[in-house]
Each structure stands twice: as C-alpha cells, then as structure tokens.
Image: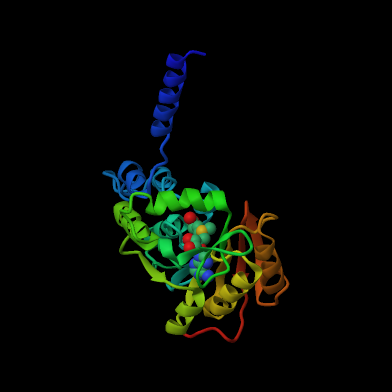
Amino acid sequence: MNIRKILKNIFHEFNQQDITKPQTAKEYLDKEIEELPIINDLKFVNIDDCMRCLEKIPGILDCLEGFTLFLLSMTAPGNNSIVEVGSYLGRSAAYMALGSIVSGKKGIYAIDMFPRKEDWYWGTDGYYHIRGSDYYLENNVFKERENFFYGDRFYDSTLEIFTDIIKKVGLERHIEPFKGTSVDYSQLHKIPLRMAFIDGDHTYDGVKKDVFALSDMIVENGYLCFHDYSNSFPGVVRAVDELVIKSDNYRDIYLVKSLLIAKKKNVTNNISP
Ligand SMILES: C[S@@+](CC[C@H](N)C(=O)[O-])C[C@H]1O[C@@H](n2cnc3c(N)ncnc32)[C@H](O)[C@@H]1O
C-alpha cells in the first residue's frame, strides 16, 4: 500500500469516528423528547400516541412493562400517591404518571440517588458504584452512561436530566423527584401508598432495604412491584422470593416480562390516611 492510500485510510477512519460520536443527553433530549399528546382535538386520550412518546425516554424498561405500570397506576385502589425507587431518567415514572392523570389520581414520588459524576467510584470488585448504594455497573455500561450524562458538561447530575425530560414531556405537576434512598424518604414521609415500584439498587441487601422502608405504607389491595425479577439479577429474585412471594402479606402474584406484581393483603400495620 502506498503512502497516499495509508493517509486516505487514516483520514477515512478519523471521519467515521467523528460521525459515530456518541450522543449526549442534551443532544438526545433536544432531538427526541416531545410533549405528551394527552388530550387531542377530539377531546380523548390517544394511548397509542402517548405510548410512542414515552418510549423515547431513555431507560431499560420494556414497553409492555411500561404499559402494565400505566394500567396498575390507574387501577390501584384509592387516591393515595405512588412511590418509585430507581427513577433513572424518568421512563417508569412517566408511565405511572400518565395512569394517574387518566384516572384523576395523585402522582408519583420518584426516588433516586441521582448521581453527579463525582458520586461514582471504581470499586475493588471491578465495578463502578454510586457512593451510598451497593448499585453497580460494568465498565463498558458505565463509560457509555458517563458520556451520555456528563459528556458535554451541560448537566451536572442525572437529577437535572430527569427534570428536563419530565418538563419537556409535560408531566412536572405529576412527578416529584426525591434525591436519596427509600430509607431517607421513609424517615421524612409516612404516607399511605396505592402502589410502590422498586427498581433501584438490585443487590439482595438493597432490595430488602427498599421493601422494609415502603411495604408498611402500602394500603390493602395496593400493589408492590419490582423490575428485573429475572436470572440476570439473583439479588432481586432472592429478596422478592423471601419477602414477598413466601410472605403472608402479599397475594395474587403476576409476572409481566421481568416486572413482578404483588397485591397487599389486609394487614394491620398500615399507615392511616
Ligand atoms: C435500572 S435504573 C432505573 C430505571 C428506571 N426505573 C427506568 O424506568 O428507566 C436504577 C436506578 O437506581 C438508582 N439507584 C441505585 N441505587 C439506589 C438506591 N439505593 N436508592 C435509590 N436509587 C438508587 C440509580 O441511580 C439508577 O438511576
């Protein structure tokens, strides 16, 4: 190969890299996120259009799982709030907020550590962790997210990205973020819940802490739901098996993909409204 060809190849590769430069959250949000078409001109809610809009919110939750969360938030008993643990950039919270709007019910408290770049550290176990949680990410996943969240330095923490997404979708009156853990939240708020959705720290101890913090607040026939009840997350499976499936406090267990749903039985230690 002559020198001209080598230079041409190098130049071509350089250009290719430039074209495939990974997107940052700001770029993605500007291009892809749109306002939820809640009421159209004919004065009815087009759920199809709403679902297409919510699918654009970054996240791992599958659309059938999202649709199920939407239905559960509509049908969960009473008009108490919903709490979710592990909000990330707002995808699951948005599905539940849509269900709350359609049914005229109270909205969502969205709990997350909402990390800044400096809250992440490389652990001796070879994974990236968030300070204050056992949550972990593999190196390649962390690198991808690091660029997406903080790559252009537009956002300082995922709370800002979350807030911008929820505002742009038009759900800011229905979702209230809470920075911290379920334990921090439960020390400040003791309110009855029609539903709790757990998708934060996926370790055995992490899930146990979330269940202990929230379970007593769920009203009779209210729902306790978990994401990632699957072989990929043995900590989630073990904690849910022990604390929910084998417990006398829950009945009517359903699984939709990796979303596990349990109904609270009539137990005496509920918080009164
Ligand atoms: C799998 S993501 C949640 C995905 C989200 N539910 C969705 O639909 O896109 C897990 C989230 O849990 C948060 N997290 C990790 N440990 C936590 C903890 N102990 N308490 C609260 N949030 C936590 C992380 O910051 C991350 O945003």
Which corner quadrant holds the C terminus? bottom left
Q: Residue furthest top?
A: 2
Image check: 150 left or right of 215? left
> Residue 234, position in %: x, y?
69, 61
Instruction: Say if residue 88 shows up in the picture.
Output: yes
> Residue 22, position in %: x, y?
42, 41
- Specify how the rendered protein is coloured: rainbow
> Residue 180, position in %: x, y?
45, 73
Say above or below: 5 vs 30: above
Say which residue appears at 65% left-offset and 64% top-offset: 236
Say above or below: 215 vs 136: below
Say which residue appears at 60% left-offset and 70% top-offset: 207
Quadrant location of residue 124? Answer: bottom right
> Residue 237, position in %: x, y?
69, 63
Which residue is at the front of the view, 126 or 68?
A: 126
Say above or below: 215 vs 262: below
Image check: 92 left or right of 258? left
Say which residue appears at 43% left-offset and 20% top-offset: 7
Say above or below: 189 vs 136: below
Quadrant location of residue 89? Answer: bottom left
Which residue is at the front of the view, 258 or 72?
A: 258
State how many labels appear. Answer: 0
Say which residue appears at 40% left-offset and 53% top-offset: 149
Q: Residue furthest right?
A: 246
Instruction: Say if residue 273 shows up in the picture.
Output: no
Q: Residue furthest front?
A: 3
Which residue is at the front of the view, 235 or 24?
A: 24
